[in-house]
Image (tube, rainbow, N blue to C red):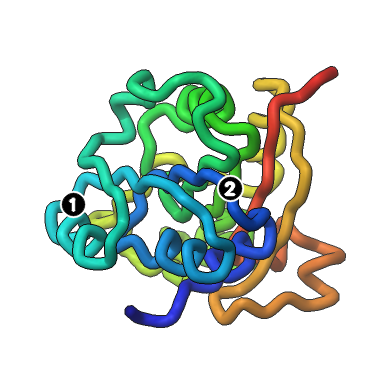
Amino acid sequence: MASLRTDLVLLTEWIEPGKHVLDLGCGNGALLVHLREKRQITGYGLEIDDHNITQCIQSGINVIQTDLDKGLSDFEAGAFDYVVMTQTLQAIRHPGKLLQEMLRIGREVIVTFPNFGHWQARLSLALGHMPLSRALPNHWYDTPNIHLCTLADFEDLCDALKIEILQRAVVDPAHKSSLLMRLLPNLMGEIAVYRLKKSTK
């Protein structure tokens, strides 16, 4: 299987060994295979693409074909230790509603998404064009993304939904961070990685 994507390597560090994980939009199952080998997790993937589902099955991953826009009502509350969704939030019709559903069925949630506040995106918009970058490689007319956001936008949503942010990291597509990214995450980070839980406040 191909090498693991940047954000997936980072979130692996946040998942405790031996836990039960649900991966939403799991693709070819690469993350679940990696977590099974490195963290001895058990779990399921949800995926809509037939080719990806075939790859998951070939890798021994339990996978269910479903459309995430239809929600997670088939799963009981607290059914998983972690619910993960990587590079998919921006393609969901109702991201806030899905985040709440993820927190209903999972003790913790980990999400990753491209940061629309990155300086290259801002520069492209200032010059009159939709951004194209390593983190946002699709043209406006063929992109699956319908709800792009910045780190500040996402954190405002978490505050509105009473979601507690446990950890946040920003990286570039080469899995590198820098002092500038730590000082100015919303301006310099290309990919955002968040670990969340329901707020107790």
Quadrant of the image occupied by residue 186: bottom right
Residue 75 position in % (x across, y down): 40, 24
Residue 72 position in % (x across, y down): 38, 26
In the picture, the disc for residue 19 is 2
Question: Image point 21% across, 45% down: which residue?
Answer: 48
Quadrant of the image occupied by residue 152: top right
**SS for dot 2:** loop
Q: Nearer the viewer, residue 164 or 18?
A: 18
Q: Amino acid at mark 2?
A: Lys
* Left or right: residue 92 compared with residue 13: left
Residue topped by disc 1: 49
* Left or right: residue 71 compared with residue 13: left
Q: What separation in Å lies between label 1 and label 2 (alpha carbons)?
A: 26 Å
Within-10-Å neighbours for mark 1: few <14, some 14–19, many 20+ = some
Quadrant of the image occupied by residue 164: top right
* Left or right: residue 9 compared with residue 140: right
In the displayed structure, 158 sits above or below 90; it is above
Question: Image point 37% across, 19% down: which residue?
Answer: 73
Q: Amino acid at mark 1?
A: Asp
In the displayed structure, 154 sits above or below 131; it is above
Residue 1 position in % (x across, y down): 33, 79
In the picture, the disc for residue 36 is none
